[in-house]
Image (spheres, rainbow, N blue to C red):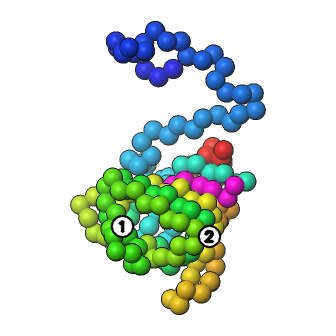
Amino acid sequence: MPEAASGEFWSDIKPIEVNFKPDALPALFLRDPAGYDERYAFPISETVSAIPLWISLDRNMWSNILIARSAGLVNRHYHPHPVFAYTISGKWGYLEHDWTAQKGDFVYEPPGSSHTLVCYEAEEPMRTLFILTGPLIWLDEDGRTIGHYDVHDFVSDARAHYEANGLGASHVESLFR
């Protein structure tokens, strides 16, 4: 149960006793991941890091908060599946679009979207929640495929980072759903 009610109209309602089906996975609750412990953020590029929030290996999906403390770049890439983004702080955009996302802005990237993610110098670090269905297809300057990055690469990078910084490689498994 959440904190005790202090006079809210619903304070006498009893919680559902069996709120998960027998084979359901547990809910995932992370307290303030955007205000994070630095150890949870692993590099996606030389200037941008990711904090994993939720991972689905069988659907090749993940959710993370991307972070850039100063100007940042995630190289050119293509998305064959939709991507959703919500900006928590800072400023970011795509070189190929005419907008700049700032705190409170939402972005939907349709399948078939190619772009170069850039993060701007700002008063606050760029922190954006992304929900991705992989893979990202890395592109060269001419838009030709040069590699890919999917949920398995994401997990591998997180495991290596967590093992190296003392959290333990298995920490990433607590995010599997």
In the rendered image, which quarter is residue 99 located in? bottom left
**Left or right placement of residue 133 versus residue 69 in this view:** right
Displayed quadrant of residue 155:
bottom right
By secondary structure, the bulk of the magenta-drawn segment is best described as strand
State yes or no: residue 81 in magenta: no
CA gap, disc 1 and disc 2: 21 Å
Residue that protrudes farthest toward the bottom in the picture: 142
Q: How many marks?
A: 2
What mark, if any, has residue 100 been given in the picture?
Answer: none
Mark 2, residues whose alpha carbon is within 10 Å: few (<14), some, or many (≥20)? some
Q: Secondary structure at mark 2?
A: loop
Give the amino acid type for the residue marked by disc 2 in the picture: Pro
> Considering depth in this image, is 165 or 159 the residue closer to the camera?
159
Q: Residue 80: which numbered mark, if any?
A: 2
* Residue drawn at 42 percent across, 12 percent down: 11
Q: Is residue 122 left or right of residue 33?
A: left
The quadrant of the rendering that contains the C terminus is top right
Q: Dot 1: what SS?
A: strand
The residue singled out by tag 1 in the image is 92
Residue 172: x and y, percent? 62, 50
In the image, residue 176 lies at what x, y percent? 65, 47
Q: Earlier in the sequence, mark 1 or mark 2?
A: 2
Q: Which residues are magenta?
A: 59-65
